[in-house]
């Protein structure tokens, strides 16, 4: 049974309060973020249906929105999602090499997850860190000025956290 | 040293916290604004000559005066913190390090516009910055700057942070409004404009983070004093986010009287190009503005020094000039490949098209594919003309300016670097291992002397 | 004194008319009619909020109004631009418009499968008409086209997403005519698609109208598919007393002999569902899918077919080969991928009038 904890449900109603009466659909993006964090890092159909019920909207309205925004994962992802930027300014500063290095190091292609389910590699477009390139998003924060050594350290850090 | 209005306190330790911010003179503009009428505040902003810092450069005071004020209908102010234009990362800096400056500006602006509930729409990836902002709003609330009956004025004001979820198009103001309503980020067909029918069909003003932050010094120092900084219609100070091949990438506050050359090479700013490389090209205002070769970047076609301000950067129009745009300053050195760089930008716009209208939906992917083809040494001469024709058929024919934003970089790259594209076609093998290099792109341009 | 309705003077392609304030440029042009009316692939006058997306209806505004006669800097979508008094508009008299429109048509056809010979909509497809009239060159697109799997959405409707041009009309039908929408637009940009996401059935008495508003063959009537080609059936106007509230009961039956191959709403000259007493003549699924006997209907007479449409060409005197249209759509390029069904199929000899064959056609009927 998919259900938010009491605490999360309180958060949901708090978010809904931010908008005028009857405009609870506005809470969709924030609530989908909550749901993705809570239910395994991705949005399975039952999860989206649950969100639709919470906000009294049709499930298709949720699918339409979830599939539009690139941060919502509609398929399972690894525990650690490496989202490496590949747009112009990052490319100029060597993002291609970083992506290549991660591929060989983790032995996965872009869009793939390691066999142990720990890491997924994704390429993304400009994340607003162009001056600190190359960079990637990992969870809630950015890792910037990436080098091969830094990638090694990040992978090690994730591995030790996972244990 | 140029005068700093936004970042002058950025390096004070602890400025992120309310206490330090207040001790350094924060929230004075709110106190001052409450002694003025909303109309007087709008007038000050008009006097200041402030132009929107989100990219389009529309005069802010004028935008505010257009806001419809029907009886009994709420009005909204929405801060555009979606910052996703490649090369642009200035709003992030403001929000991350001096969050109270934005909040202060938003209180003043909301009071001027009559918005009792305002929102900051921040790009979803800036998740930790959303937390910083929410903390700062809580602090402001505890100290009586946000909430009911602020400072006993009878003005009620709530401020909320809304995170996006990964979509550049939500920086376009009507797409942003749709997104804030919990929908797909499809830009609306205008008219009606947000000033008449915006968020939940109510009159709405959407302003960039930096624009709203600039309201603070304008109220503190007065619109007229603000207008004295800078030149011509480029008043006040502007944040530039500099990146690419420079020694000191980062955020700089300039007063728009400095030359592009000094900006790139002086130690106060970018500090020149690393490893003794030479300047090849630059995209001076975020990825959608035209790229310029070194010669046209530093000197206008008229032979004048190009300056870092709205007028000078656009001098020569699209034929020989560019734009200030969002202030995302991307420098390319002699080792950079223009074709590859253009390809990554085309890929970006392809990835970010909302898909609502056919020229942008179909044309952006097409351009990316052709650029990939040329970049990988499989291009033909006719592909270059085809690219030109596609961008021409997208530009101006779409619902929102993302179509133009996708077309311009391709157009400018072909306009100024056509021989580099042709070289790729003519050297299908060599182009995989070598770069075209600097060639003549920094050579002085011949300026016709008029008698 | 009666309220005077304000009217505006607007000049389109050198023809001036008076229209009520609030009229769009497109509707003003439709009042003039003929070639002056820009093609519209996404706008649908009976669906609120439609239009603005396909960009085929772009026109040039040479003068904004008498008060402000400056030209508009960009071409505008005529379906979403309201007229101003003294506005001067150029449609087919503008080179800029023709050029842009040819571009839009190319974009729309870019990923289109051009499978006209096997498409149900062939002959009454607005995209086919559009390509025929405004398309210019053959495709310059040399990359693989995007493809999607066919999807059944409910027992009556099949979605052939590959052909969809994302006009959004069907989503407006679902929103405005049915009690709940189960299909919508998923993903974004070039990957955007119409879908239910999890293969839900579209099930509502008025869902069938999605088929009528679809400008291409993306949504088709499953009860009709592959039975015949549109141009071999004979459309007649018919009606029945229908007790579904909201159904007008006025239809077009597509007959061959005595057999009803398909039922659709009646269309006006712009390809939209006709209006009766100011109300759109939507029909219910019972009329559309369940009434397949001529005895269910009172037949009024032969339907007049719009002269713009490919079907209207020589409808009753001898049949037009679809091949010609296909080539035209593809800019004269003889289709390699496509087959001419008349060459390939034994059962579609155009020399034989299908309506004269009694009962279902078999290969035998065509063997001389
Ligand atoms: C595709 C597109 C993306 C945009 N992205 C942003 C953005 O990230 N941030 C922003 O402030 N304005 C952005 N804009 C401009 C906004 O539409 C709007 O003009 C701006 O927020 C107005 O604020 P200002 O007047 O303060 O500049 C974008 C526009 C377009 C067409
Ligand atoms: S131009 Fe592109 S992003 Fe803008 S509405 Fe059209 S498809 Fe969407
Ligand atoms: S399925 Fe048809 S009606 Fe629906 S969006 Fe596609 S083309 Fe338009
Ligand atoms: S280009 Fe990578 S963060 Fe902007
Ligand atoms: S009919 Fe006007 S844009 Fe599609």
Image (tube, rainbow, N blue to C red):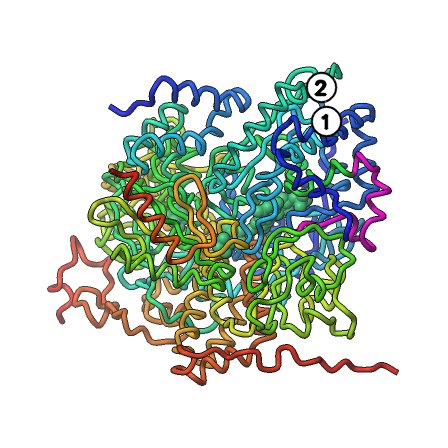
C204 left or right of B407 in image = left
Dot 2 or dot 1: first in sequence order is 1
The total of numbered circles placed on residues is: 2
User: Looking at this rendering, what residue extends furthest in the right direction?
Assistant: B451
Residues beneath discs 2 and 1 located on the same chain? yes
In x, y percent, where is residue B320?
A: 69, 71
Magenta span has C105?
no
Q: Is residue B230 above or below residue A160?
A: below
Residue C246 figure quarter: top left
Residue B413 figure quarter: bottom right
Which of the labelled discs sits on residue B111, or is there none?
1
Instruction: Mark 2 and mark 1 in contact? Answer it, CB < 8 Å.
Output: yes
The secondary structure type at the circle numbered 2 is loop
The secondary structure type at the circle numbered 1 is helix
Q: Which residue is mark 2?
A: B155
Is residue B307 visible to us here? yes
User: Looking at this rendering, what residue extends furthest in the bottom direction?
Assistant: B426
* Foreground pick, C290 / B239: B239
In x, y percent, where is residue B121?
A: 55, 36
In x, y percent, where is residue C357?
A: 19, 58
B166 left or right of B409 in image = left
Residue at mark 1: C-beta within 8 A of ligand 1: no
B437 left or right of A10 in image = right
The quadrant of the rendering that contains the N terminus of chain C is: top right
Residue drawn at x 28%, y 60% as measured from the top left: A104
Q: Is residue A114 above or below residue B182?
A: below
In x, y percent, where is residue B130?
A: 52, 34
Q: Chain of mark 1?
A: B
The quadrant of the rendering that contains the C terminus of chain C is: bottom left
Q: Magenta segment, which residues? A: B218-239
Residue drawn at x 41%, y 67% as measured from the top left: B369
């Amino acid at each position: 049974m998919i259900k938010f904890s009491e605490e999360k449900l309180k958060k949901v109603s708090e978010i809904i309060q931010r908008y005028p009466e009857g405009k609870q659909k506005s809470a969709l993006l924030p609530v989908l973020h909550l749901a993705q964090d809570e239910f395994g890092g991705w949005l399975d159909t039952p999860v989206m249906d649950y969100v639709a019920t919470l906000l009294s909207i049709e499930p298709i309205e949720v699918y339409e929105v979830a599939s539009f925004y690139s941060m919502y994962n509609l398929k399972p992802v690894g525990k650690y999602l490496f989202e490496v930027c590949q747009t112009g300014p990052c490319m100029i500063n060597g993002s291609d090499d970083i992506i290549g290095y991660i591929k060989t190091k983790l032995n996965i292609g872009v869009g793939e997850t390691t066999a142990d389910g720990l890491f997924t590699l994704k390429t993304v477009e400009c994340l607003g860190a162009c001056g600190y390139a190359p960079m990637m998003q990992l969870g809630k924060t950015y890792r910037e000025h990436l080098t091969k050594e830094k990638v090694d350290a990040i992978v090690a850090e994730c591995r030790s956290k996972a244990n | 040293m140029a005068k700093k209005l936004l970042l002058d306190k950025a390096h004070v330790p602890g400025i992120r916290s309310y206490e330090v911010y207040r001790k350094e003179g924060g929230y004075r503009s709110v106190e001052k604004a409450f002694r003025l009428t909303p109309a007087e505040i709008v007038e000050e902003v008009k006097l200041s000559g402030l132009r929107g810092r989100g990219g389009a450069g529309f005069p802010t005071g004028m935008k505010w005066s257009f806001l419809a004020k029907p009886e009994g209908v709420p009005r909204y102010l929405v801060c555009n913190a979606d910052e996703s234009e490649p090369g642009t990362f200035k709003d992030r800096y403001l929000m991350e390090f001096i969050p109270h400056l934005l909040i202060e500006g938003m209180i003043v602006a909301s009071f001027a516009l009559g918005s009792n509930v305002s929102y900051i729409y921040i790009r979803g990836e800036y998740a930790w910055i959303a937390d910083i902002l929410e903390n700062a709003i809580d602090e402001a609330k505890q100290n009586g700057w946000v909430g009911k009956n602020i400072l006993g004025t009878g003005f009620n004001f709530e401020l909320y942070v809304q995170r996006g979820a990964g979509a550049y198009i939500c920086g376009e103001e009507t797409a942003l409004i749709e997104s804030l309503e919990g929908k797909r980020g499809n830009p609306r067909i205008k008219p009606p404009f947000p000033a008449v029918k915006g968020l939940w069909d109510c009159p709405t003003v959407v302003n960039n983070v930096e624009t709203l932050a600039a309201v603070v010094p304008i109220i503190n120092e007065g619109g007229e004093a603000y207008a004295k900084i800078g030149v011509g219609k480029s008043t006040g100070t502007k944040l530039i986010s500099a990146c690419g091949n420079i020694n000191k990438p980062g955020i700089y506050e300039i007063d728009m009287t400095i030359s592009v050359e000094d900006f790139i090479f002086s130690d106060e700013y970018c500090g020149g190009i690393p490893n003794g490389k030479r300047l090849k090209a630059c995209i001076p205002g975020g990825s959608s503005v035209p790229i310029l070769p070194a010669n046209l970047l530093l000197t206008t076609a008229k032979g004048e020094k190009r300056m870092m301000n709205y007028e000078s950067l656009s001098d020569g129009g699209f034929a020989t000039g560019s734009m200030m745009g969002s202030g995302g300053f991307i420098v390319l050195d002699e080792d950079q490949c223009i074709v590859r760089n253009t390809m990554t930008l085309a890929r970006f716009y392809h990835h970010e098209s909302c898909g609502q209208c056919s020229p942008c939906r179909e044309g952006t992917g097409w351009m990316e594919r052709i650029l990939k083809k040329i970049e990988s040494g499989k291009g033909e001469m006719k592909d270059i003309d085809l690219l030109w024709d596609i961008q021409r058929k997208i530009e101006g024919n779409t619902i929102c300016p993302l179509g133009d934003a996708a077309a311009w970089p391709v157009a400018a790259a072909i306009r100024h670097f056509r021989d580099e594209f042709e070289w790729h076609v003519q050297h299908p093998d060599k182009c995989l291992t070598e770069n075209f290099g600097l060639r003549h792109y920094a050579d002085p341009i011949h300026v016709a002397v008029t008698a | 004194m009666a309220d005077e309705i304000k009217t505006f003077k607007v000049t389109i392609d050198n023809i001036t008319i008076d229209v009520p304030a609030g009229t769009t440029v497109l509707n003003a042009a439709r009042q003039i009619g003929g070639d002056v009316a820009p093609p519209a692939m996404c706008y649908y006058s009976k669906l609120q909020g439609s239009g603005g997306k396909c960009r085929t209806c772009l026109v040039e505004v040479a003068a904004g109004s008498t008060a402000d006669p400056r030209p508009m800097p960009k071409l505008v979508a005529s379906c979403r631009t309201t007229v101003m008094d003294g506005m001067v508009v150029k449609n087919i008299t503008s080179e800029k418009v023709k050029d842009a429109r040819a571009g839009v048509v190319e974009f729309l056809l870019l990923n289109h499968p051009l499978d006209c010979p096997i498409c149900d909509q062939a002959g009454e497809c607005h995209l086919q008409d559009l390509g025929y009239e405004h398309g210019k060159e053959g495709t310059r697109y040399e990359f693989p086209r995007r493809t999607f799997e066919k999807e059944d959405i409910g027992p009556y409707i099949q979605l052939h997403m590959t052909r969809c041009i994302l006009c959004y009309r069907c989503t407006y039908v679902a929103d405005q005519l049915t009690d709940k929408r189960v299909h919508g637009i998923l993903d974004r940009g070039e990957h955007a698609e119409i879908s239910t996401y999890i293969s839900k059935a579209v099930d509502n008495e008025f869902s069938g109208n999605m088929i009528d508003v679809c400008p291409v063959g993306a949504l088709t009537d499953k009860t009709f598919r592959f039975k015949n080609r549109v141009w071999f059936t004979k459309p007649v106007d018919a009606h029945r007393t229908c007790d579904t509230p909201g159904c007008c009961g006025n239809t077009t039956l597509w007959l061959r002999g005595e057999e009803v191959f398909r039922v659709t709403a009646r269309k006006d000259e712009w390809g939209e569902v006709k209006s009766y007493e100011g109300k759109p003549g939507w029909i219910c699924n019972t009329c559309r899918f369940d009434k397949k006997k001529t005895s269910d209907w009172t037949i009024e007479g032969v339907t007049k077919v719009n002269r713009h449409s490919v079907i209207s060409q020589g409808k009753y005197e001898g049949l037009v080969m679809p091949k010609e249209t296909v080539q035209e759509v593809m800019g004269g390029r003889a289709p390699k991928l496509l087959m001419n069904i008349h060459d390939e199929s034994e059962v579609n000899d155009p020399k034989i009038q299908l309506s004269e064959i009694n009962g279902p056609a078999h290969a035998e009927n065509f063997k001389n």
